[in-house]
Image: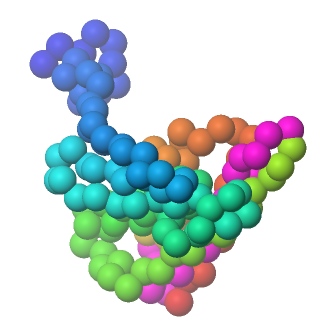
């Protein structure tokens, strides 16, 4: 293992880009089908009603909100599994708010996380920090507000 000044335990292989290919087909009428390369699973997107679509499926920006919530749940789950903590039943909700100016874009993604653990859980602070290490959170433009509220049971 060569480190070349990298953080302890990080190898050159860890620094190589990892990619997943997703293929999309425009189906017409503001609808697309996306196919996940590794699994072959597909999903459909539809433009929202307020942007000339039918709103019959996730819009592309809905998928951004979905990606943020599922990513946060996943990183919390990884931490929990490492520490023998059961998060089954954890519930997240993401409220997506669009802005129109200067361009139409996501302005705010408000995240509510309901954790099925007591508020005095010894790993509470670490799990809350883990959420903010989510790669989707880190990838979103800084102009997108991303407030997170935790509700411990």
**Occupied quadrant, residue 97:** bottom right
Position of the N terminus by quadrant: top left
Q: Among all residues in the image, which is located at the extreme left?
A: 1
Indicate the position of residue 20 as horizontal and vertical percent values.
27, 38
Residue plotted at (75% across, 52% down): 107
Indicate the position of residue 152 as horizontal and vertical percent values.
55, 83
Tell me, yes or no, whether the highlighted magenta stretch contains residue 63: no
Q: Among all residues in the image, which is located at the extreme front?
A: 28
Above-or-below relation of 30 to 91:
above
Residue plotted at (28% across, 33% down): 19
Q: Is residue 21 left or right of residue 93?
A: left
Q: Which residues are magenta?
A: 102-122
Towards the viewer: 27 or 149: 27
Residue plotted at (23% across, 58% down): 41
Q: Among all residues in the image, which is located at the extreme bottom?
A: 153
Towards the viewer: 100 or 108: 100
**Occupied quadrant, residue 73:** bottom left
Residue plotted at (86% across, 44% down): 101
Indicate the position of residue 116 as horizontal and vertical percent values.
44, 86
Tell me, yes or no, whether the highlighted magenta stretch contains residue 119: yes
Marks counted in the figure total: 0
Q: Do we see residue 21 in this rendering?
A: yes
């Amino acid at each position: 293992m060569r480190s070349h000044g990298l953080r302890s335990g990080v190898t050159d292989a860890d620094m190589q880009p990892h990619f997943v290919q997703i293929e999309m087909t425009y189906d017409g009428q503001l609808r697309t089908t996306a196919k996940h390369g590794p699994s072959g699973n597909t999903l459909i997107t539809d433009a929202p009603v307020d942007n000339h679509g039918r709103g019959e499926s996730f819009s592309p920006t809905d998928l951004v909100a979905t990606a943020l919530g599922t990513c946060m749940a996943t990183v919390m789950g990884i931490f929990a599994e490492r520490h023998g903590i059961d998060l089954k039943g954890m519930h997240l909700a993401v409220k997506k708010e669009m802005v129109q100016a200067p361009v139409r874009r996501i302005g705010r993604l408000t995240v509510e996380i309901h954790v099925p653990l007591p508020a005095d859980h010894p790993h509470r602070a670490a799990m809350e920090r883990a959420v903010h290490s989510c790669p989707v959170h880190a990838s979103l433009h800084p102009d997108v507000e991303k407030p997170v509220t935790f509700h411990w049971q």
